Amino acid sequence: MSRVVIVGASVAGVRTAQALRREGWAGPIVLIGDEDAIPYDKPPLSKAALAGTTPLDQLCLLPEPRAAGLDLDLRLGSAAVGLDVVEQLVHLADGTSLGYTDAVVATGARARPSPWGTPRGLHLLRTADDCRRLGADLAGASSIVVIGGGFIGSEVAATARGRGLQVTIVDPVPLPMARIVGDEVAAILAGVHEPHGVTTRFGVGVHDVRETEDGLVVALTDGGELHADVAVVGIGAAPNIEWLAGSGLAVEDGVTCDEFCRTVGGPHVFAAGDVARWWHPREGGHRRVEHWTNAVEQAATVGHNLVHPDDLRPYNPVDYVWSDQYDWRIQMAGRCTTAVAPELLGDPADARFAALYRDETGRFTGAVTANWQKAMVAVRRLLLAGEASIDAARAAVEAAHQKRGPS
């Protein structure tokens, strides 16, 4: 009997299983996860779960009734260690092997490790266990240093500040988000922290982190030192592809796929989520995206293409990501190209603005909004519809401003 084996039990793997059933797949589905825990959602780990306002057991992606409805064969707590695309087998760490008709690689990414070792009190944050350990340490701490000023680091800083800790964020880049949104908007986002009582040390790197009797000492590249009870390293993520060594799949910063999410070098093997590096039809190049929305939407494409091989759909998404920091909700959609300076609408001083991005031709390419849901809904609708001008995007935001009701 035909069988689909999905390797990876986070959001991309779970959503692929759901998409398969929704598209009419009636055969067996095996879902493999390396953690013992029932699949859970990860965005709250740096926010509500770490704050203690949402228990970890409420993050479950597959409650028992839903799992039963999908009729899944869950294989948890046994990581995949190899893939044989010739014999169509997935090899597991417990020594067993599973045959498949089609396989989906959805093994995600892991936090990049600390370059400064693992002294007590130094944390990464990627899994539920990471969240438990960090939360336990924060409960008895008064100060924290967050290394990395991206979204994850900023969310951890905001959560720790909300728990009453003294917080310092360190990043070697003067404006941590500049590569993604440009200097002007990055400066606004970097300025969110200090009004909330968080100290920022941007443009300064970390030389070392060492444990002392009183906690941790974070030695900076400018010769300074920061003392803290706890430190968190948030310096990016790396795709989980090591288990595919020797499989024949093309791997380069992820699993290389075509526009239909079919892997290169692996017949009957697809990929979805943080691990997938697929050919983007609109941009004419390969991309890998580490966003929750991307994992959900890509899983839907994989599910369709597996069930309907004669009606393949290219995966051609509009990027979308959000971040909750303090009393700010920051949202990004599309490609925030910096070839042309963005147009700023609203007032960052009032904690509400929209930055609209365009290319040299005036084509609207992306947007960043803060605390302005209606504006994001309007511009995202334009991006999803296809070609739109910067004038159309501006008009959409202005129309959103005129609408009554909460922003």
Image: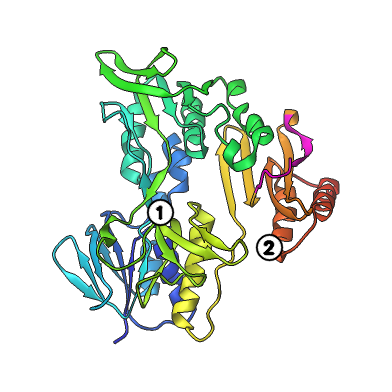
Task: Residue at 48%, 22% (x, y): give it.
Answer: 204
Q: Which of pointers 2 and 1 lies earlier in the amino acid sequence?
A: 1
Judged from the image, the secondary structure of the residue bearing numbered disc 1 is loop
Amino acid on which disc 1 is placed = Asp
Which quadrant of the figure has residue 317?
Answer: bottom right
- 366 displayed left or right of 50: right
**Which residue is disc 2 drawn over?**
384
Mark 1 crowd level (few <14, some 14–19, many ≥20, 10 Å Cα): some
Residue 253, label in figure: 1
Please say whether residue 116 is visible from this viewpoint. yes
Indicate the colouring scheme.
Answer: rainbow
The image shows residue 285 at horizontal and vertical percentages of 54, 61
Asked if 289 appears above or below 179 in the picture, the reply is below
Q: Where's the N terminus, which quadrant?
A: bottom left
Number of marks in picture: 2
- 333 displayed left or right of 225: right
Judged from the image, the secondary structure of the residue bearing numbered disc 2 is helix
Question: Magenta stretch?
Answer: 336-348
